[in-house]
Amino acid sequence: MDRRVLVLNSDYSPLHVCNMRRAICLMLLEKVDVLKAQDDLILGVSAVLEVPSVVRLKYYVRRPWTDIPLTRQNIHLRDNHRCQYCGSNEHLTIDHVIPKKDGGGFTWDNVVTACFKCNNKKGDRSLVESGLILQNKPRKPSRSVLYKYASQDGAMWADFLACVN
């Protein structure tokens, strides 16, 4: 029940990523159509349900445009859960490329995912002083990048995310 499901608006634009339990509730309430299902089935007492991967709302939901929030989870998603200095995926933290003491803020262009070891090695110094090299320059991600990283099986959602910018 920990699988993720892509929720599309009635115009097929990506709206949200929810867990499988929520998607099944929406199915039972007949609020969504299942567009893509996984091979698994859920056996209930009175019904057999397919496990959804992509669902579409039957009614259009107007959602005000919001900017991508700068959160720890979104930073890790943008960096694909990898240290941007050594590539490790264990003991991940957030590092300021330009330290706070030197005027570096908590912005998309200044924070990266770093493992505990690299973060301690860099400390409160600049990249040149610490001798570390960034693998990728930090930048603000597009919504499609976050949706793609949020999927557990990118191939299942690829057709629905092809036109998202």
Image (cartoon, rainbow, N blue to C red):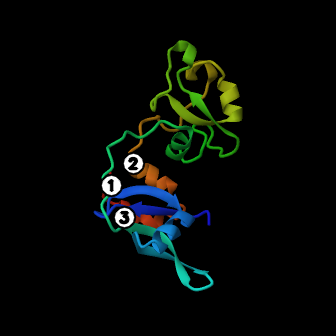
Give x and y (percent) for residue 89: 65, 46
Give x and y (percent) for residue 113: 58, 37
Give x and y (percent) for residue 126: 57, 19
Question: Please, what secondary structure does the residue beneath circle 2 have?
Answer: helix
Q: Amino acid at mark 3?
A: Phe
Q: Which residue is mark 1?
A: 164
Crowding near the residue tagged with mark 1, few <14, some 14–19, many ≥20 C-alpha atoms within 10 Å: few
Residue 29 occupies which quadrant of the picture?
bottom left
Q: Which residue is mark 2?
A: 143
Q: Residue at x 61, y 82 (%)?
A: 44
In the displayed orientation, state which residue is furthest to the left.
Answer: 11
Q: Which residue is mark 3?
A: 160
Question: Please, what secondary structure does the residue beneath circle 1 have?
Answer: loop
Q: Is residue 20 above or below residue 84?
A: below
Crowding near the residue tagged with mark 3, few <14, some 14–19, many ≥20 C-alpha atoms within 10 Å: some
- Between discs 1 and 2, the one toward the N terminus: 2
Q: Residue at x 69, y 26 (%)?
A: 121
- Callout 1–callout 2 Cβ contact below 8 Å: yes
Give x and y (percent) for residue 99: 56, 19
Cα distance, mark 2 to mark 3?
Answer: 13 Å
Q: Nearer the viewer, residue 58 or 53?
A: 58
Cα distance, mark 3 to mark 1?
Answer: 8 Å
Q: Residue at x 51, y 68 (%)?
A: 25
Q: Amino acid at mark 1?
A: Val
> Number of labelled discs?
3
Q: Amino acid at mark 2?
A: Arg
- Between discs 2 and 3, the one toward the N terminus: 2
Q: Is residue 126 above or below residue 145?
A: above
Question: Please, what secondary structure does the residue beneath circle 3 have?
Answer: helix
